[in-house]
Image (cartoon, grey):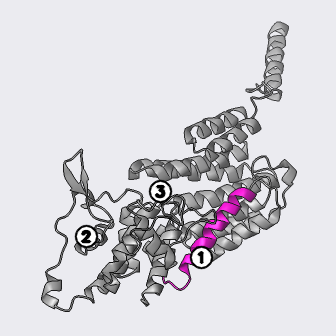
Amino acid sequence: MKKIWLLMVVVMLAGAAGCAAPQVRCTSPSDNPRHHYLRGMEALEAQKIDLATEKFDRALYCEEQFSAAHSGRAVAFAIKARTQADAGYRGVEQERSLESLEKGRTTAETSNDSFEYRVAAIRVHNLLKGHKWLDDAEAAYREAMNTKVDEKLLDYYQGQEAASYFIGLAYLDAGEFRKAEDKFREALGARKDGKWNEPADRAWKKTTKIVRAMGGLTVGDVGKKIAVKDSVDRGDIAALLIDEMKLDKLFAGRIPVKSRLDGMKAEFTPADILSHHFKDEILTVMKWKVRGLEPKADQTTKAYLFKPADKVLRGEMAFILEDVLMKLTGDEKLATAFFGQDRSPFPDVKPTSPFYNAVLNMTTRSIMEGELSGEFRLNEPVDGAEAILAIRMLQQRINIH
């Protein structure tokens, strides 16, 4: 009997010892949750989403209740959701993102944990764009700024200006450009050598250009979506000309015979715009035969396609706007105004370039601008703000209201 009792005591003590000292999963100095969390956030910056997810998963393997890793994981899943074309897969990633975000909230133990969760919430709401997403992002921003943090211990975000930067990105996506400009300026003013200074400076310059482009121009939903793009495509330009500049109405006003106007239409519908969201605008541009926006011969299909996703370069933009200017003013001499010149004011635009005349027509009228370096950037893509600003200046030059 004594042996049985002794055996039971040994088993109970062994069990108690096991509870008191749980197995340590990660023992290497570099194999710890904070290390994996930081590598995961760096992977997010580099758009290596699968690697980021792996790092967050490893951090949570090392410490299941590690709040920052849950918050980082939420951002990774939100980015995945945004890139999913299939609604079913997108819904799965959205659910994972929101579940991870909630775990980031419930496992937060310190004020720094709470701050990291709230910045993640700003990012997730902006990425997923659910019901009243901007309201939710603003609420998370206010909570983040009211959180007392020890910035020396903020592993990744490093300072509260991170919240200002990410709510600025949310405002930019929402088309609230002046609010975005204010928040980027706020992030810049926080410190000169901080982690978020450089990205905030880039975003502030971009937003300032957008605000400038919007001055004196009432831009609708289409224009606001295009304004934030780093490069615009042929479909975007067609939409800006028709939806924002009302080009169809302007051109129609120059046709005195109604029967002729009623019979005008695009010669054909290119196969690659049949389901395009700017199909009507593209067909309208084709109807008016705007140079630079004609269908192109495609060697693969042996057909003429519009190629709406092709980026528009600055030289091409000058060519398009020159044709619009000629059609609206009736001045066909514009097409050869600068022929025969030996010297170009732009080192990257030779007088023999097919875009030379258009570039000079646009720059001498301040419709488009060169760089302070002296170059025109002929072969670089036009961004959304540049496109809108050029259209605004064109409207002013021909006194369109």
Residue drawn at x 31%, y 69% is 291
CA gap, disc 1 and disc 2: 30 Å
Residue drawn at x 57%, y 45% is 47
Decide: few, some or many residues near mark 1? Use Cα within 10 Å; few <14, some 14-19, many ≥20: some
Labels 1, 2: front one: 2
Q: In this orientation, which residue lies closer to the viewer: 385 or 365?
A: 365
Say left or right for 20 vs 240.
right
Marks 1 and 2, the one that precedes in the sequence: 1
Say left or right for 138 vs 9.
left
Q: Does residue 210 appear anywhere in the picture?
A: yes
Circle 1 residue = 211
CA gap, disc 1 and disc 3: 25 Å
Residue 186 image-quadrant placement: bottom right
Whether the magenta-drawn stretch holds residue 199 is answered as yes
Counting from the top left corner in percent of width and height, residue 37 is at 71, 40
Q: Are marks 3 and 2 in contact (CB under 8 Å)?
A: no
- Quarter of the figure that contains the N terminus: top right
Residue 372 image-quadrant placement: bottom right
Marks 1 and 3, the one that precedes in the sequence: 1
Range shown magenta: 197-219
CA gap, disc 3 and disc 2: 24 Å
Counting from the top left corner in percent of width and height, residue 293 is at 31, 65
Indicate the amino acid at tag 3. Answer: Asn
Q: Residue 379, labelled with which disc?
A: 3
Q: Residue 256, labelled with which disc?
A: none
Indicate the amino acid at tag 1. Answer: Val
Circle 2 residue = 286
